[in-house]
Image: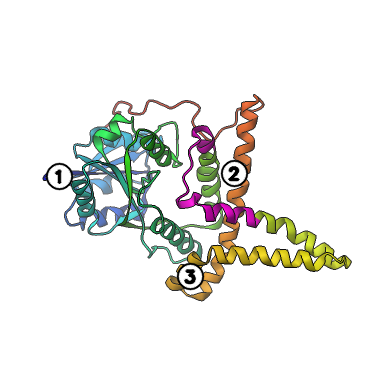
């Protein structure tokens, strides 16, 4: 354990943060102790979020045009003076002890490069999909390996010197994507230690609807993540990519392929119908059993009705995640053969730490 308590600079990018952003800053103002420095990067905002940041005493960096949170965080890191960079999304309200936890984590682990936490188990938005999505995130992180193989910037901290040495986030991502995962992969390749610290939590304030959820999961997570895995040949049996999730994807695909065949066989009176029906039932039972821990978690937190509602959405998640992987694999092969240039990753990594453009 180090005798010196590290200083912490909170770095938060914001683009039209609205009331969620105010709640984020309010949570930081109530933190005990408060951060040693609060840096807000107003990434082309048009709703006056930068003024809200000033109300809370933040050091504000204003960018005239939105360039994405990767670039914004890099600029904040460049300006920061703390030993530790604590990245917090503008729609996350941290727990009162978050800063204290970050200081303790790095003081007690001098060889640790980075750490991240999870959303809490009390999402702010009451609608079903917001509750489902954020509770699922909480569960996945709370059951993940503490010796992490990736990084998460929603509520994640990293030593500033390590971050700068690594070149920061890849600024080729012009919108929220997998820039934090990609940084985590680079950190692990360099032998850096990353910890999933399960008591470091923040409340996610975001409202999820069906379109926004699927669009984000597919276009900004699954497809680019598939490309990253194929490019770097690096995949861990953890978090969203653990063996139970992979097996569930295969089971959902098999069940989906089997159901119309079973129905047709039943309608036409084929003798094979009972075997097909039993196979479909076995696949559905397998999905229920292998995912029973998360369904029990939903039941404990929100009751039986919620858990039953979550099951079809969870299976749908496996379906579109699997389809995205197949599409990503196909695009990877087509690029190798020179038949397409479509990609969901930056063609070239942009300058990771560009010069500061404008500042207040």
Residue 273 position within the rendered picture, expressed as x and y whole percent measured from the top left: 81, 66
For the question of whether residue 156 can be seen, the reply is no
Quadrant for the C terminus, please: top left
User: Which numbered circle lies on residue 2?
Assistant: 1
As for residue 325 lying within the magenta part, the answer is: no
Q: Is residue 294 above or below residue 54?
A: below
* Stretch of the chain drawn in magenta: 227-252
In primary-sequence order, the first of circles 2 and 3 is: 3
How far is the residue under mark 1 from the one under mark 2?
44 Å
Residue 125 position within the rendered picture, expressed as x and y whole percent measured from the top left: 42, 63
Tell me: 357 left or right of 309: left
How far is the residue under mark 3 from the one under mark 1?
41 Å
In primary-sequence order, the first of circles 1 and 2 is: 1
Question: Magenta stretch mostly in which secondary structure?
Answer: helix
Query: Mark 2 = which residue?
Result: 325
Residue 127 position within the rendered picture, expressed as x and y whole percent measured from the top left: 48, 65
At mark 2, the secondary structure is helix
Q: How many numbered marks appear?
A: 3
User: Which numbered circle lies on residue 296?
Assistant: 3
How far is the residue under mark 2 from the one under mark 3?
28 Å
Mark 3 vs mark 1, foreground winner is 1
Residue 340 position within the rendered picture, expressed as x and y whole percent measured from the top left: 64, 28
- Image quadrant in which you'd find residue 315: bottom right
């Amino acid at each position: 354990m180090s005798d010196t308590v590290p200083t912490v600079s909170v770095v938060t990018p914001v683009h039209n943060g609205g009331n969620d952003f105010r709640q984020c800053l309010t949570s930081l103002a109530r933190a005990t102790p408060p951060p040693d420095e609060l840096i807000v990067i107003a990434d082309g905002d048009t709703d006056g979020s930068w003024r809200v940041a000033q109300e809370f005493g933040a050091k504000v960096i204003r960018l005239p045009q939105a360039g994405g949170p990767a670039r914004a965080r890099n600029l904040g890191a460049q300006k920061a003076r703390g030993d530790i960079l604590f990245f917090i999304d503008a729609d996350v309200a941290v727990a009162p002890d978050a800063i204290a936890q970050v200081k303790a984590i790095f003081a007690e682990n001098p060889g640790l490069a980075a750490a991240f936490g999870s959303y809490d188990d009390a999402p702010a938005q009451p609608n079903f999909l917001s509750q489902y999505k954020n509770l699922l995130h909480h569960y996945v992180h709370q059951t993940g390996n503490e010796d992490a193989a990736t990084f998460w910037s929603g509520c994640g901290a990293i030593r500033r010197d390590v971050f700068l040495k690594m070149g920061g986030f890849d600024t080729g991502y012009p919108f929220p994507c997998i820039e934090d995962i990609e940084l985590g992969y680079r950190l692990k390749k360099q032998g850096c230690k990353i910890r999933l610290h399960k008591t470091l939590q923040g409340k996610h304030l975001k409202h999820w609807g069906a379109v926004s959820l699927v669009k984000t999961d597919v276009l900004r997570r699954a497809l680019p993540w598939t490309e990253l895995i194929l490019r770097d040949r690096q995949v861990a049996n953890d978090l969203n990519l653990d063996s139970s999730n992979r097996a569930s994807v295969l089971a959902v695909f098999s069940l989906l392929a089997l159901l119309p065949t079973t129905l047709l066989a039943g309608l036409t009176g084929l003798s094979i119908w009972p075997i097909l029906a039993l196979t479909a039932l076995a696949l559905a039972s397998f999905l229920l059993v292998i995912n029973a821990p998360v369904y029990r978690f939903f039941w404990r937190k929100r009751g039986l009705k919620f858990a039953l509602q979550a099951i079809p959405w969870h299976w749908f998640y496996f379906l579109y995640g699997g389809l995205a992987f197949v599409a990503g694999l196909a695009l990877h092969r087509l690029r190798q053969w020179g038949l397409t240039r479509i990609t969901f990753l930056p063609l070239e990594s942009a300058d990771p730490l560009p010069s500061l453009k404008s500042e207040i």
